[in-house]
Image: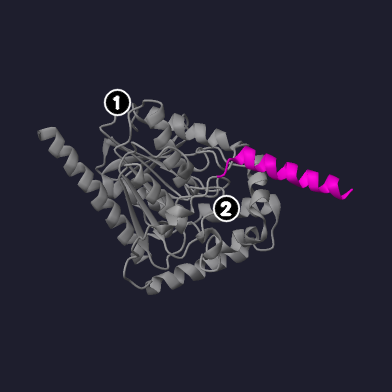
Amino acid sequence: MLWIILAIIVFIVAVTLLLFRYEDLSYLDRENYPVKDAMPSEANREVLRRIRELGQYSKNLRGKARLMALREIMDKVSEGIELASEFRQCESPRGEWVLAPGCDTRRRILYIHGGAWAAGSPKSHRTITDRLSQIAGAAVFAVDYRLLPENRFMDGVRDCREAYQWLLNHGPDAAGPADFMVVAGDSAGGSHALGLIAWIRDNGLRQVDAAIAFSPSTDLTLTAPSNRGNIDTDHMLGPVFRGLSKVPLPVIWWTTLAVFRVSPTSPVASPLRGNLENLPPTLIQVSDSEMLLDDARRYAARARAAGSPVTLHIWPGMVHVWQIFVPQLPEAEEAFDDIKAFLAQLDCQGNDRASA
């Protein structure tokens, strides 16, 4: 009997190693990135209090009821906040145009919201898309991609790809080519955004002029040190995913494969593990206290080693995707100032090339 059990264990281990083809990326952790020299503002305490309060709303719920509560909570994030943009619904592709006064509709941003691929919507991230439209002077299209568990993971990926292809030649008012294109996203949406720019390159499409990712998930194998090391300091994701820290990684990988129907080592789900050569200028913002810190650091290190221009800026003590709390949070304002400077630099470089 014992030898049968041992044989089964060996078989499972062998199949796991063969199927997931796991590559140890810990060598990327040697790269040292500075953290902004600042203390979290007083407003950050209020944000943390609000997050804890919202967490109580769904604390005793389970399964579908908890997911529905999470979706409802996220859609209320921007309620009561004065936004400058016009919000215009689009049926095909499904999403929402966000148009700040005076924006140039030939300048376009595809925004992909976060929410663990199971929650979030264009409405939940209006504070971000409104501000992006303002600082970039661009028309933002927030794609309403299909979510888990009602749909497959790849359905959402395809929605983002189709939205990008459509956006290349369609503005909010009429068909017409884009003069300037950006892909941006946060958390799970940041993963989709980084995966999308690699797909654009591989398929010979017009590449974006820039990519922006807020606290992106880049590796679903969950092997980065901060995935477990920052559970106690991540006030957004920590309470939700604390239980995962006790689950063996191979079990997580098999569960991910079953739920996503995509291997956690696939570049579609884990952009870090794909080809990172010849990618556009990319800005990544992350906090040193969140679980996805090393997802960002590892992606930046590997992309730079592959020759792709990636800028990584790390804030101290911020909540996951703190940019969504603009304008209440001064650090969110700083983050958008950072993005504005990043885009302005690209505009200057583009003007220099045009005049050369």
Quarter holding the C terminus is top left
Say whether marks 1 and 2 touch (CB < 8 Å).
no
Specify the quadrant of the image occupied by residue 265: top right
Indicate whether 313 appears above or below 97: below
Report x, y in % for residue 226. Answer: 50, 61
Query: Which residue is the extreme one toward the front?
Result: 3
Question: Viewed as shown, does residue 194 lie left or right of 182?
Answer: right
Report x, y in % for residue 191. Answer: 47, 45
Instruction: Give the dominant element type of the magenta stretch: helix, strand or loop.
Output: helix
**Residue carrying label 1:** 176
Tell which tag, 1 or 2, sits nearer the viewer.
1
Q: Which residues are magenta?
A: 1-22
Question: Viewed as shown, does residue 27 lie left or right of 265?
Answer: left
Query: Which residue is the extreme one toward the right?
Result: 1
Query: Which residue is the extreme one toward the left?
Result: 356
Residue type, numbered disc 1: Gly
Indicate whether 136 appears above or below 35: above
Question: Is residue 12 inside the magenta stretch?
Answer: yes
Residue type, numbered disc 2: Glu
Mark 2 crowdedness (10 Å alpha carbons): few <14, some 14-19, many ≥20: some
Question: Is residue 270 inside the magenta stretch?
Answer: no
Mark 1 falls on what kind of element?
loop
Report x, y in % for residue 313. Answer: 34, 58
**Residue carrying label 2:** 72
Mark 2 falls on what kind of element?
helix
Q: How many marks?
A: 2
Camera-side residue of 349 and 26: 26
